[in-house]
Image (cartoon, rainbow, N blue to C red):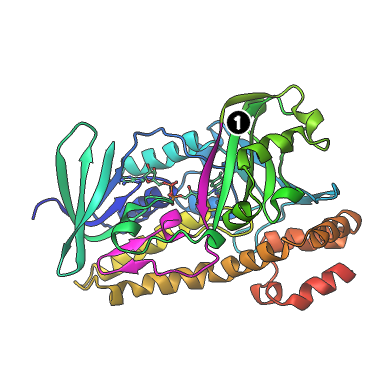
Amino acid sequence: MNNICDMIIVGGGPGGATAALYGERLGLKVLLLDKQYFPRDKICGDALSGKSIVYLRELGLIEKIEASPQAFVDSIIFSSPNEKVVTIKLVPTAQHGITSGYVCRRLVFDDLLFQAAKAKVETIEGFAVHDLIREDGMVKGIRGRAKGGSEQEFFAKVVIGADGANSVVARKTGLYEHDLDHVLVATRAYYRGVSGLGTAIELHYVKPVLPGYFWIFPLEDGLANVGIGMVKSVLKKRKIQLKDAHIAATEAPFFRERFRNAELLGDIKGWNLPSGSKRRTIHGDGFMLIGDAASLIDPFTGEGIGNAMASGKIAAQVVAELSKGSDFSARALSIYDQRLWKNLGGELKLGYNLQRTARFHPLVNLVVHRAAKRPEVADWISQMIAGQVSKRELLRPGTYVKLLLK
Ligand SMILES: Cc1cc2nc3c(=O)[nH]c(=O)nc-3n(C[C@H](O)[C@H](O)[C@H](O)COP(=O)(O)OP(=O)(O)OC[C@H]3O[C@@H](n4cnc5c(N)ncnc54)[C@H](O)[C@@H]3O)c2cc1C
């Protein structure tokens, strides 16, 4: 066998690049592969929240983000189906004191992260993985092809599937699922000249797509990232064409004025968001799945970058620990599942509870109305977003009754 390394990472998005960077720090020999060449686009809302900032800080990349084209964000605007609006200020996060976020186009952000990894580990771009190599059931490597090239094989102690929503690694290991109740779907388009943009990301709970939302996120130089997303099973049931819903939202009386002079740049594009509303097996003999390949997107907010980075870090740590020995079996790698769910399980469960609750539009109206009228309710939501309210309290239904009676 030639080309043996500690960890082959299939996919150089935020999950894969983060795993590579932490892997290198931990002294691992890493090979990072991506079928595309960077910079490349990825359909996304482009919002980087507190969790992503934690990893970017740890990796020493915040200054690079700040020096790149992006928009600084310090608050969230929510609107309800009956058009009440509240602005929630971002307050310091409980664990890390982060008070702001960024909106940075993935063309820029992913390239920044990938180039940081490329400076530290071996990378191959334009290399599509199409199969796994197994020995006695253990994944031992990958088989793929560079653009225009012949088939190549690479071997590693562990293969990491960081290859996104349509993961080849998940498919080849029998772990790919597409359960419409646990997949979100969303559009994204860039506009120039949407009026009224500030330093807030805007989440508008418009009735046709509840519990999903229509978003308007500010970007650099008067650009905006605009999209609409919902649960896929609800979309099918209501027979909604998401692109039509996107256009209808920009033309609705509540938003029409803001889009009157806006220019749509390029196409309205759609993509799936595999959500973490259902716990799945994400490891096996010789491999682990991270990020979208592991379905880790927040079921309520649709955020997945922070969780992709979190899973990338944990996966790299597990490979480093197990590399002291020689056991990379499913049993040994199960510590990855355990640590990941200990870390993310509570908030994914909360996200799913909020998603199910938000299907009931009078309740969304009531919460936004109360928050707009009563600063203590808005403050409580700020603290909840910042992780200052304990998960136990957040998962207790009585908490919300108390909040609405405030
Ligand atoms: C419309 C929309 C809006 C969203 N908005 C937000 C948001 O505002 N904030 C947020 O945090 N999250 C958002 N998300 C979720 C976020 O985009 C994902 O969670 C995130 O990209 C996951 O990162 P990843 O590294 O796991 O996968 P990806 O970013 O999808 O990267 C996977 C990589 O694998 C490569 N690859 C795929 N197959 C192969 C193969 N066979 N061989 C080699 N390479 C391969 C791809 O080229 C790609 O570079 C949004 C998603 C959508 C669809």
Front one among 49 and 366: 366
Query: Crowdedness of circle 1 by 10 Å Cα count: few (<14), some, many (20+)?
Result: many
Residue 253 is drawn in which quadrant? top right
Residue 223 x/y as whole percent? 64, 28
**Residue visible at 81% across and 62% down in the picture:** 363
Q: Position of residue 244 (x, y in %)?
A: 65, 37
Q: Quadrant of residue 112?
A: top left
Q: Residue furthest right?
A: 373
Q: Nearer the viewer, residue 163 or 92?
A: 163
* Quarter in which the N terminus is drawn: bottom left
Quadrant position of the C terminus in the picture: bottom right
Q: Is residue 115 visible?
A: yes
Residue 285, x across and y down, in percent: 26, 69
Instruction: Give the residue displayed 53% in from the left and 59% down from the top.
Output: 180
Report the front residue among 175 and 72. Answer: 175
Figure check: 201 above or below 141 = above
* Magenta-highlighted residues: 268-295
Number of callouts: 1
Task: Give how far across and how far down residue 45 sits, in percent.
Answer: 58, 42
Q: Which residue lies most toward the left here?
A: 1
Residue at the image position 60 percent from the left and 31 percent from the top: 190
Determine if the magenta segment contains residue 57: no
Tell me the residue that label 1 is attached to: 190
Position of residue 299 in the picture relative to residue 173 (left or right): right
From this view, report whether residue 90 is shown above or below residue 395: above
Residue pictured at 51% horizontal, 49% vertical: 272
Q: Which residue is at the front of the view, 362 or 262?
A: 362
Q: Is residue 83 left or right of residue 131?
A: right
Is-magenta flag for residue 294? yes
Identify the element where label 1 is drawn.
strand
Quick check: 53 above or below 350?
above
Inspect the image, locate mark 1, and give the three-letter code of the amino acid beneath it: Tyr
